[in-house]
Amino acid sequence: MENLLLSIYGKTITKIDIDDDSFYLECGDNTYRAYHMQDCCENVSVYDSNITSCGCLGGTKIRSIHFEESGAWPDDVEQNQYVESFTWTTLTINTSCGKKLIVRFFGESNGYYSENVYFERTHKRIT
């Protein structure tokens, strides 16, 4: 994943889309997706993002992009006492216009299944 992240530094954002469980980033002819590959008994979804407060990001360049996984519960989220295992994954994209795009994924399981978020180039175009 690190090589793919490095390969999009400096690319221009043309479109962004987000749904319940995936984040899509279009840069020219390439579309990238952050998502979780469902296995069985885990749930990983987009918890929140600041996309609407960032305004229009189309036409800005990616200055940095990185993922951070954490087993600590965020201070701004009420903790669910019934979760056996969880992972918070934060995707942060810094842009040339000075805006920082943040997407947080929340994963939970019984501890046996992966709660990881993956990043890949995809053929799906954002409409």
Image (spheres, grey):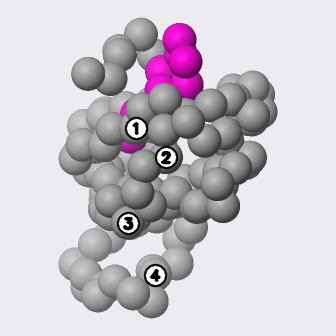
- Which residue type carries mark 1? Ile
Magenta region includes residue 91: no
Q: CA distance from mark 3 to mark 4?
A: 20 Å
Determine which residue is flagged by label 4.
74
Q: Nearer the viewer, mark 3 or mark 4?
A: 3
Q: Earlier in the sequence, mark 3 or mark 4?
A: 3
- Name the residue nearer the viewer: 87 or 10: 10
Q: CA distance from mark 2 to mark 1?
A: 8 Å
Q: Earlier in the sequence, mark 3 or mark 1?
A: 1
Give me the residue at 33% from left, 59% from top. 52
Give me the residue at 62% from left, 31% from top. 12
Q: Nearer the viewer, mark 2 or mark 4?
A: 2
Q: Nearer the viewer, mark 2 or mark 1?
A: 2
Q: Is residue 69 left or right of residue 4?
A: left
Determine which residue is flagged by label 3.
53
Q: Position of residue 11 (x, y in %)?
A: 68, 29
- Name the residue nearer the viewer: 69 or 42: 69
Determine which residue is flagged by label 2.
57
What is the span of residues highlighted in magenta in the rendered image?
Answer: 22-31
Q: Is residue 109 left or right of residue 33?
A: left
Q: Is residue 50 left or right of residue 102?
A: left
- Which residue type carries mark 4? Pro
Residue 119 visible (yes or no): no
